[in-house]
Each structure stands twice: as structure tokens, then as C-alpha cells.
Image (cartoon, rainbow, N blue to C red):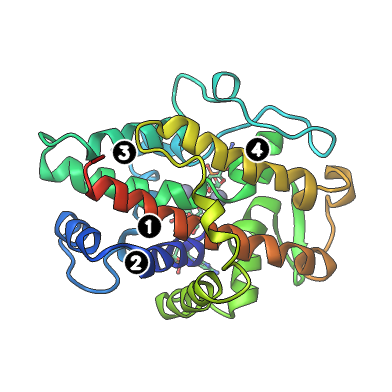
């Protein structure tokens, strides 16, 4: 996701975490405001472009070597290479946060990574190998030339919300939070936490990746790559994608809240 998606996921999570969790992560992140999660949600995207952070670039995705739209699916053994992937990164940085001996600097970094990667794993194209997660599929969106990955990360969320500022994210998060508490997601939200086990971050997050990857076959490339190369996606394609984007951002925020609650409780 772009900044809007990540900051919205973070605000949704802040709306659901327990008071103990709020205090726990406000301390780690040295930020006592309501934006303590949203304020660091895009840090990992800046860090990966620095020399010190280059190692973390592969941690933002898992390149599922499936065959959309015919066959979708993610396999940790097949799709997570030695240099790492988003599932391995969620395992690593969650494990670090559970280590009572971890120093404050690495604890701060681990928290920022977990907040970001639980967002990215819910973006369908972050769980897909084809054309580098759609980065090499040229398209236009509202007459601007871009690529399919960027359309899902940024163009479609920003068209839906009407901007990408921090207040835009907070406003979108307020709407998604209401949908989870009392609206369209109310009956399903409990099921979003099925299969979530702090003692097994790999099985937990591969399930999230698998679920998002199914949308690559259903919604991202339903008629295959050739049907959208060079096409304008701001019309019917956008309308079909919006419900998936809203659902995935809502799920990511709700699951991030639960994951942070489990971490703050120390696995107890
Ligand atoms: N981005 C950045 N610096 C750059 C290029 C892009 O911060 N030099 C940001 C823009 C998007 C985000 O990265 O918000 C997309 O990251 P990803 O595709 O890993 O989700
Ligand atoms: N950004 C975004 N959507 C845009 C333009 C920018 O999400 N339409 C993000 C990318 C960078 C940040 O905002 O992370 C700052 O972008 P810029 O340096 O282009 O102002
Ligand atoms: N990306 C991805 N899968 C890949 C390569 C990149 O999901 N195989 C994501 C990471 C960034 C965006 O695409 O969010 C752009 O990546 P880059 O800046 O590395 O081109
Ligand atoms: Zn992306
Ligand atoms: Zn990212």
C-alpha cells in the first residue's frame, strides 16, 4: 500500500487495541499521541531505499509462483527465498518483540516493521510473483500512465478517499472502524481472527497471504494479464476493486490490533 493504506490500517488498529497495548506501543515508539501507530506506518517504505535498509526490501512481499487467473496459491517453502519475504519478516520481528532482552532501538524498529508488514501482506499484489507483483504491467488510471501494482497500492485507495493526507487516513479508518463494530463487517470480523496464533507467526501470516492472493485470480487479473495491459482502469475495473480494497484494509487493521494485543500481553 501507499501511505494512505498503511496509515489507515494503523488508525483502524489503534481503534481496537486494548488500553494496555496502547501504553505498551506508545512507550516503544516514544509517541503519546493518538497517531502513535499511523505516524510510523510508512517508515519501512523509506528505510528500504536507504543503504542501511536495503536488506529489508524483499520483506515487503512474497512472490507466489502461482499461475493467475487459472491457479492461485502461496507456499512458504516454495515462495520465500533465502533473502527473505514478508512472512519470514513477520516471524522474525514478532519474535524479536517477544524477547525481553531486546534493546530499545531494535524494539522500536521491530515494532515499526510489524505495523507495516501486516498492512502490506493484505495487498493482493504483495502476494504475487507475476510481473514483479504487477509492477511491470503498464496501465492507465484516470488517464495517467502507471502500473498495476501502483494502481492497487495508491491510485484506487486515493480515488476512493479523495486524498492521501494523514487526516484522510484517519477519516477512512473511522468509517472502516464503524463498519467493523456495527456495520457491514460486524458479522464477519470475529472470523478474521481465526487461525491467528502468536506462537506460530508463519502459519498465521501465510493464511493472510493465501487469502489476499486469492483476490489476484478473482479481482486483480480475473481475465488474465493480457486483458488489462495498456488499459484504462479508472472505470469498471476500479468499481470492482473497491470492495476488495476496503475489506483488505479493514482486515489488516483489525488483525494488526489483535497481533499487537497478543504481543503486549507477552504471549501470556
Ligand atoms: N516510496 C517512497 N520512496 C520512494 C519510492 C516510493 O517512500 N523513493 C513509497 C511510495 C509508496 C510506497 O513507497 O507510498 C510503495 O511501497 P510498496 O510498493 O513497497 O508498498
Ligand atoms: N504519496 C502517495 N500518493 C501520492 C503521492 C505521494 O502516497 N499521490 C506518498 C509517497 C511518499 C509521500 O507521499 O511516501 C511523499 O510523496 P512526495 O515526495 O511525492 O510528496
Ligand atoms: N513489490 C512486490 N513484489 C515484488 C517487487 C516489488 O510486491 N516482486 C512491491 C514493493 C513496493 C512496490 O512493489 O511496494 C515497488 O517496488 P520497487 O520499488 O522495488 O520497484
Ligand atoms: Zn506495494
Ligand atoms: Zn511496503
221 w.r.t. 86: above or below: below
Residue 39 in percent (x, y) is at 31, 65
Q: Secondary structure at mark 4?
A: loop
Quarter of the figure that contains the C terminus: top left
Task: Quickly name the residue at label 2.
Answer: 14
Question: Which circle marks residue 94 in the picture?
Answer: 3
Within the image, what quadrant is residue 209 found in? top right
Earlier in the chain: of badge 2 and badge 4, it is: 2
Dot 1: few (<14), some (14–19), or many (≥20) neighbours within 10 Å?
many
Instruction: Judge depth for marks 4 and 3 and give the one in front.
Output: 3
Q: Is mark 4 within 8 Å of ligand 3?
A: yes
Instruction: Tell me, yes or no, whether the two marked residues, 1 and 2, touch with CB atoms within 8 Å.
Output: yes
Q: Secondary structure at mark 3?
A: helix
* Residue 140 position (above or below residue 76): below
- Relative image position of residue 164 (x, y in whole percent): 50, 73
Q: Nearer the viewer, residue 211 or 53?
A: 211
> How far across and down, in percent of the image, does residue 169 sit?
46, 74
Q: Is residue 45 left or right of residue 26?
A: right
Q: Quadrant of residue 183?
A: bottom right
- Residue where numbered disc 4 is placed: 128
Pointer 1 residue Cβ closer than 8 Å to ligand 5? no
Disc nearest the viewer among 1 and 4: 1
Q: Quick one: SS at disc 1?
A: helix
User: In this figure, which residue is indicated by the disc labeled 1?
Assistant: 257
Measured Cα–Cα span from mark 2 to mark 3: 18 Å
- Residue at 18% over, 56% down: 24
Q: CA distance from mark 1 to mark 2?
A: 7 Å
CA gap between label 4 and label 3 equals 23 Å
**Residue under the image location 17 percent in, 54 percent down:** 28
Amino acid at each position: 500500500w501507499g501511505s494512505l493504506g498503511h496509515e489507515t490500517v494503523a488508525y483502524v488498529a489503534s481503534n481496537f487495541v486494548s488500553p494496555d497495548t496502547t501504553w505498551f506501543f506508545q512507550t516503544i515508539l516514544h509517541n503519546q499521541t493518538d497517531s502513535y501507530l499511523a505516524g510510523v506506518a510508512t517508515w519501512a517504505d523509506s528505510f528500504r531505499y536507504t543503504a542501511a535498509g536495503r536488506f529489508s526490501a524483499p520483506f515487503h512481499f512474497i512472490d507466489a509462483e502461482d499461475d493467475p487467473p487459472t491457479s492461485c496459491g502461496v507456499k512458504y517453502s516454495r515462495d520465500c527465498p533465502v533473502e527473505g519475504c514478508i512472512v519470514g519478516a513477520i516471524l522474525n520481528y514478532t519474535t524479536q518483540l517477544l524477547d525481553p532482552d531486546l534493546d530499545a532501538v531494535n524494539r522500536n524498529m521491530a515494532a515499526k516493521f510489524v505495523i507495516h508488514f501486516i498492512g502490506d501482506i493484505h495487498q493482493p499484489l504483495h502476494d504475487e510473483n507475476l510481473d514483479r507483483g504487477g509492477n511491470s504491467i503498464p496501465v492507465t488510471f484516470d488517464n495517467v500512465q502507471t502500473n498495476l501494482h501502483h494502481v492497487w497500492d495508491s491510485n484506487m485507495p486515493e480515488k476512493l478517499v479523495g486524498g492521501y493526507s494523514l487526516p484522510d487516513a484517519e477519516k477512512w479508518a473511522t468509517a472502516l472502524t464503524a463498519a467493523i463494530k456495527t456495520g457491514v463487517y460486524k458479522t464477519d470480523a470475529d472470523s478474521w481472527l481465526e487461525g491467528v496464533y502468536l506462537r506460530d507467526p508463519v502459519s498465521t501470516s501465510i493464511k493472510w497471504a493465501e487469502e489476499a492472493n486469492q483476490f489476484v485470480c478473482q479481482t486483480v487479473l480475473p481475465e488474465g494479464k493480457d486483458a488489462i495491459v495498456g488499459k484504462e482502469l479508472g472505470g469498471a475495473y476500479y468499481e470492482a476493486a473497491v470492495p476488495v480494497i476496503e475489506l483488505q484494509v479493514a482486515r489488516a487493521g483489525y488483525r494488526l490490533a489483535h497481533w499487537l494485543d497478543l504481543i503486549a500481553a507477552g504471549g501470556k
